[in-house]
Image (cartoon, helix red, strand yellow):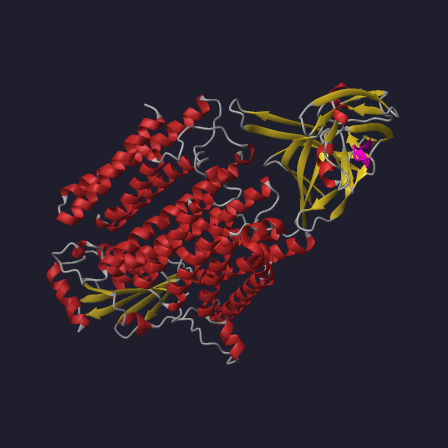
Amino acid sequence: MNSSLTLSITTFLYGFSAFLYLIALVFKWRTPGVLATGFVFAGLIGNTAGIALRWAESYQMGIGHAPLSNLYESLVFFAWTIALLYLFIERRYGNRVIGAFTMPLAFLTMAYASLSPNISDRIQPLLPALKSNWLIAHVITCFIGYAAFAIAFGLSIMYLIRHREPGRNGSVLGRFPEPRVIDDLTHRMIMFGFLFLSVGIITGAVWANSAWGRYWGWDPKETWSLITWFIYATLLHAKMMRGWHGRRIAYLSLIGFAAVLFTYFGVNLLPGLHSYGAMGQ
Amino acid sequence: MDNKEIPGDSPHPNGLWSFFASVKLSVVLLLTLAATSVIGTLIPQNETPENYRRAFGEFYYRLFETLDIFDMYHSWWFQLLLLLLTVNIIVCSLDRLAATWKIVFAKQPRFNLNRFRSDKHKISREVPQAPEELRPVIEDLLAKKFTYRRTAETAEGFVFFAEKWRWTRLGVYVVHASVIILLIGGLLGSIFGFEGYVNIPEGEMTNTVNLRNSGKTIQLGFDIRCENFNVSFYPSGMPKEYRSRLSIIENGATVLQKDILVNHPLRFKGINIFQSSYGQLPAEISMTAAPEEITLSFTSKETGMVYNKTVRSGERIVIPEDLGEFVINDFQKTYDFRGRALGPTLIGTLVQKNGATVEVLLPFKFPGFDRMGAIIDPQRDDAVLISIDDVSSLPDQQAKRFYTGLQVTKDPGVWVVYTGFVLMIIGCVIAFFMSHQRLCVEVVRRGRQCLVTVSGSANKNKLGMHRKVETIADHLLGTAGEPLAAPVPTGQNIKKEDQ
């Protein structure tokens, strides 16, 4: 059993769970939903094991480092965080409809990491600049933030579908949580994500200061993380101070997540310091 | 946070004040900053004008140049946006702080019983105890969950008020203050700090660095000597570690010696020295006099033939193919070519076929120099190019040496910025996840039984507070002996109450 195989299995487990959540939602069956939760659990265990194995393997190769150093490893951690956060939410809110909108994201993340020809899953040694404990703090906090924003994105999609119709009791939409509850949960996810994005930017800045002697350099990735921060800051102010809610917040959350994706993937197309997270690494 | 409790309408009717006190302005500024920041990530910043001209053409180059797009994050308009945001944050915060202050630092917290009574989410149940029996139970429970408690007697029983985390209302001001502190830290750094770089060959030292943005040179007040430099690689060829052993020399004495690596800088007197790059020096040649004889190679442009000839200084030789005559007539230990030191250089004269005489430079460090020179000199007919045949055969040559590339910075604002970082994290935690929670339990005598009503309010996370009220109600009415005697009558009671 190596990390590669474990993580491939994880991809399938997340895929099954996403599929079953959708089935459960569309056909209003209970059993697939319960199974889906089981698959998320199993997937999360596989994901955790995969990360741990990869960590151990890097030590066996003599280039030991935490598996958070390139695009592949960050995607695996991203999927792990989404699945974990989702399980918390399912437990807390007792509603599996949310799974149909968030677990596909975890599955797509893993599938993209495993299948994209541009992403190498080889364990590679660390470049000198990456040899820092700040790397671990930076990557973990950023991706917890991103995962929270991903879930907020799924919830916003849910909201936009749900609010159009009153959702009679028997209908598919009637199984969605109340729009008010979705709105509130989106808000919580965004606050959670915003806190971790802030900590992620801060740990990145402290790291940059110890590696290059400046905490901020308007490098495209830095700038894009700040753009993302501005968008979610706008959302939070609009919500808390101007009383925005519902559809407008949902749209802002979609825009915010687009900025997250650009910060994560798009920036690699631009020149800058963060090439470690780039394709082909 | 809660605009209902802390009204945004300002006590200052001043137009400018209310302009800056508006959250609309914050939203507009944040979105404008987000949108404009994109530009600088699409157009690479601080490139040379030639690169920009090539990429955009003259017209757009001029336009972008005028708008400071090529260094937009330091442009007047971007700084102005930041300044507006700063003023907006300060005014907004001050505008609302007064009201928050009154709530947070009130000597005695105020409770509005009517508001709790009209709470839509209150929970009422009848329990079979007398108010006097219930009183210690409720007080015990509230003591566990809240920091401030007060009991008041009413005509028909008791009212218990409790609250906690009143001070968390200040969380948002901590976040706002942290942003201001960050900007101040950044400003301090840009005024009193510098960002420079210097390359130091192994064994050499320097006391100046070049500034990155202005190209100016500044004095450090001490010397940095690079004792040695090492780079190691992984088997794949990827660099593994750069390591420079540096000595800090002040007034002729070594005061500090340290190995620096990427992520492990040296800090001395507020100046930080970072390992940033490395390189190899071109073969270092030191000569005090011209070699007695030297082999030169003459390349005919027309035929591509290369003729090697050993030449003595002052000896005139004829180049084959009727390409002219050449003589070495001078040697300089270092030749200054348009401000650039070429190092030891032979200077010769070429008499071309057409009779024109041109000067030919043969620097030992740059054997191919004449290939460039031939293009520059309009007198040259370009028929023959001359270079020093084999530099390595020359005497007094040293092995190739490394130089270490150092980033040298000073930023007195960095601790201010770090303070801002810490405050921002603390402030966000408080502002997002902690709320000022107030609870009211009213006990009203109903014959031998009594009616208990639990209601609560919070300035944030109202759904969470409803849940908390439910938990407390369950807990309270559960501990109070026979809780819900039968669900049906309780339900009826609630209905009765609601009417």
Depicted B285 relative to depicted B410: above or below? above
Q: Position of residue B198 (x, y in %)?
A: 70, 40
Which of the 4 image quarters holds residue B127? bottom left
Residue at x 34% of width, y 33% of height: A114
Query: Which portion, as a residue range, is magenta?
Result: B350-360
**Residue that sits furthest to the bottom in the current view:** B13
Q: Is A100 positioned to the left or the right of B292 in the image?
A: left
Quadrant showing the N terminus of chain A: top left
Q: Is residue B148 visible?
A: no
Q: Position of residue B233 (x, y in %)?
A: 56, 25
Q: How many marks?
A: 0
Q: Is residue A261 magenta?
A: no
Residue at x 50% of width, y 41% of height: A274
Which of the 4 image quarters holds residue A46? top left
Q: Report the front residue among B365 and B375.
A: B375
Q: Position of residue A100 (x, y in %)?
A: 23, 47
Quadrant showing the C terminus of chain A: top left
Depicted A17 relative to depicted B153: above or below? above
Q: Is residue B359 magenta?
A: yes
Residue at x 42% of width, y 59% of height: B165
Q: Report the front residue among A265 and A132.
A: A265
Q: Is A15 positioned to the left or the right of A59 in the image?
A: left
Q: Is residue A219 visible?
A: yes
Q: Position of residue B304 (x, y in %)?
A: 66, 26
Which of the 4 image quarters holds residue B338? top right
Q: Report the front residue among B69 and A141.
A: B69
Q: Report the front residue among B395 and B414.
A: B395
